[in-house]
Amino acid sequence: MRSESTTRRLAALLLALPLAACGEEKTAAPLPPPTLRAVVEETRAGIAADAPAEPEPLSQEALDRLPDLLEFVATSKGDLAKAGRQDLLGLGEGVIAKLHDVALDQAETDAHRSAALATLGDGPSGRAAAALNDVLTQGREPWLRSTAAWYLGEIEDESWVPDAVLHLKYEVDGEVVQYLAQAIDKRGFVAGLPALLVLSTTAADEEQRGAAYALAQKMADERGYATPEELDRAWRAGEVEPPPTTDGLRASIWHWISRLAEWQLRGVDDARYVLVCMGRSAAPMLGEALYDTDPYVRLHTAQVLERMGGRGRPAAKALVDHLRTPDVAPQAAVALGSVGGPSAGPALEAALAPDQRPELRLGAARGLALLADPATLETLRSEFTRERDAWPELAQAVAEARLACGDAGDAVTFATACLDRDGLDPASSGLALEAWVARRAELEEPGFADLLEAWNAIGAKRGPQFDESAMWKERKELLGSSAAVRSAKPLGAP
């Protein structure tokens, strides 16, 4: 595991990208960087000011009544049990903490623990949800976590959703995964769908695989999609409308954004995961966070938006602004290419211009590869011609962007040469070439299905006797000898 000091050094390296050795540095007279302020701190302070006061501890009389009321709920059904739960909650808001403790106490009977969870499900939304989420984190028994997840879904407040999404990342019991995904879906969010799709193909039990897929299908049906896979693609592209953002959800998202400033790697990784999964619900707030004075918040926010893809499009304007913020501009350029939008292509083409800072130009080329907009091809071809001999690293990134836009010819030749060229990353060009071949195989261009099969077969040989270097060398030879590659034309060419 990386130490905190190692994490700090890695972050510092990202924030101070070295200038590439590409000759004399050229600089433009740029617009001034956008104004920064303590966005996260100020916003969270305002949220804290609106938060309700901590509840008073239960009186001794209430503490004396609690066991009998809990027993009544545990042994009753229907309206009687509901009335008992309301009597329990009537003891005062301090009862939430007591019910939380009962639920986690393995010395208590299962009936009492279930009654405590059921009462929390009827409780005041914010504190009850926090208590149930904590049971998900600390509860040892799968039945306990499943029950907590069920009652979370009954609470009409969305503040608990981001924390529940994080539980999905670490949950190992398939039944709990289903209950959590269902609870998140009840509040209108799609974030539990990927976990269901994984479970539907990996669960050891066939019945569990079928149940997971059936729940995923139900989510698709409710949103007008034919299959869960179609819903998943639309959600990742930012095409699924999120539910309205409540004050509770907004406060929770800002909590996770604040964790992007942590030094501890686990906390930052968890925050990035949660925020990516929250998608369009979090994107406007991430756009605000890009203006924070903390450079690590800005950097990690841009990384989150890159991973969001189309779900991060509400933050596109802020990313364009931060092409003028020197320390995070390269990452902002990559993120802008990922989220897309009408302004992305022109802004990235301008950032690729030779009078821009070298590290920004490199980020812009990588962003254009993610954007994959054929309208940028003329600019990409011009910059490739300019830099192919002067700056191989940028030429490699531009060639890969051309491949993503459907180009062929010298872009393929150059990217293929990068598979074993000193000082360049073969995996980067390898992924670009693989996607280029796969796309043409999907379009049924002659020879590309066989080429893709041969490419994959070479990859399957990798092992102790056939290392990564040997794999890339053989794949390079495969592409160099392919008649299909030599005769390929840019997509859309006559």
Image (cartoon, grey):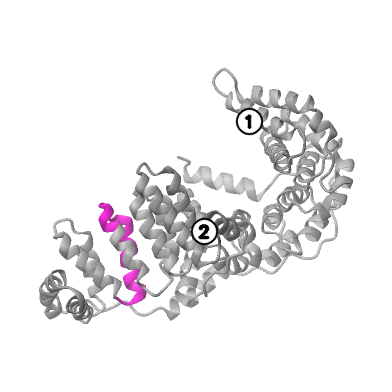
Give the extent of the magenta segment: 123-145
> Which is more toward the observer, 285 or 264?
285
Q: Position of residue 44 (x, y in %)?
A: 49, 72
Q: Secondary structure at mark 1?
A: helix
Q: Tell me if 474 is positioned left or right of 154 in this view.
A: right
- Please identify, in this view, whether the residue under mark 2 or under mark 1 is nearer the observer: 1
Is label 2 in contact with label 1 (beta carbons under 8 Å)?
A: no
Residue 214 in which image quadrant = bottom left
Task: Check residue 133 for magenta coloring.
Answer: yes
Does residue 190 show up?
Answer: no
Direction top: furthest residue? 465
Residue 31 lies in magenta, yes or no?
no
| x then y, percent, for residue 134 | 32, 61
Q: Which image quarter is the N terminus in?
A: top left
Question: Which residue shows up at 75% across the image and 60% down it?
Answer: 344
Q: Secondary structure at mark 2?
A: helix
Q: What's the amino acid at mark 2?
A: Cys
Question: Nearest the camera: 111 or 52?
Answer: 111
| Residue receiving disc 2 | 277
Count neighbours of disc 1 (C-alpha within 10 A) and say few if under 14, some if 14 to 19, many if 20 or more.
Answer: few
Residue nearest the observer in this picture, 438 or 243: 438
In percent of width and height, residue 410 lies at 85, 36
Instruction: Say which amino acid is labelled 1.
Output: Asn
Whether residue 397 is visible to the viewer of this picture, yes or no, is yes
How far across and how far down the image is residue 453, in percent?
65, 30
Spatial separation of the CA atoms under disc 2 and disc 1:
31 Å
Q: Which residue is mark 1?
A: 456
Q: Residue at x 74, y 23 (%)?
A: 477
